[in-house]
Image: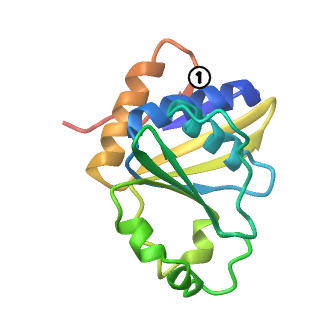
Amino acid sequence: MRVRLDDEDRQVAFGRRLGRALDGQGRVYLEGELGAGKTTLTRGVLRAHGHQGAVKSPTYTLVEPYEIGGKRLYHFDLYRLGDPEELEFIGGRDLFADDALCIVEWPSRGAGWLPEPDLCITLSLSEPGRTASLEAFSDLGRSVLAMLSQEMASDDVIIEQEREQQ
């Protein structure tokens, strides 16, 4: 599925929808160049769960934990990760094994160590804003895509959608 996100407000609104569809669980990997809006999208996901504070990318700490409404959410930024094994030292296995929502920016930096995502979202610059390309890798991911597709059908923002084959 590809979605057009014309401005920051739409990107945050899409993040809110994504957050509601995920319902506080799963692994979402965010790909895209610097400035593509990975943290902006994450802000929307956190807003869906009630977080009202600032959301900054945890570039130097690697992970920012949130506990909102009894749910645990972890925002990872692996841009400055020197070696995927560093994730072991910060307790990454426990965080990913937890019944939580893990959002990972720059997942390619953790290749070989990170578990398979439920959903991978690639953000790319496109005039006037961004395009989000979503791909599911699990039943949860496919369920989230189906919910988003249904909810966004009347918004005229879906550029392309794969049809399930009968």
Which residue lies under the disc numbered 1? Answer: 157
10 Å neighbourhood of mark 1: few (<14), some, or many (≥20)? some
- Residue 122, above or below 45: below
Across and down, in percent, residue 85 comes to 55, 87
In this figure, what is the number of numbered marks? 1
The answer to whether residue 90 is left or right of residue 96 is: right
Taking the spot 30% from the left edge, 39% from the top edge, the residue there is 143
Helix, strand or loop at label 1? It is: loop
- Residue 12, above or below 123: above
**Residue 159, quarter of the rendered image:** top right
- Can I make out residue 158 in this image? yes
Taking the spot 63% from the left edge, 87% from the top edge, the residue there is 83
Taking the spot 32% from the left edge, 43% from the top edge, the residue there is 142
Which quadrant holds the C terminus?
Answer: top left
Taking the spot 40% from the left edge, 72% from the top edge, the residue there is 94
- Residue 29, above or below 13: below
Depth check, front residue: 85 or 136: 85
Across and down, in percent, residue 43 comes to 65, 40
- Can I make out residue 160 in this image? no
Across and down, in percent, residue 104 comes to 56, 60
Depth check, front residue: 57 or 52: 52
Across and down, in percent, residue 47 comes to 58, 32
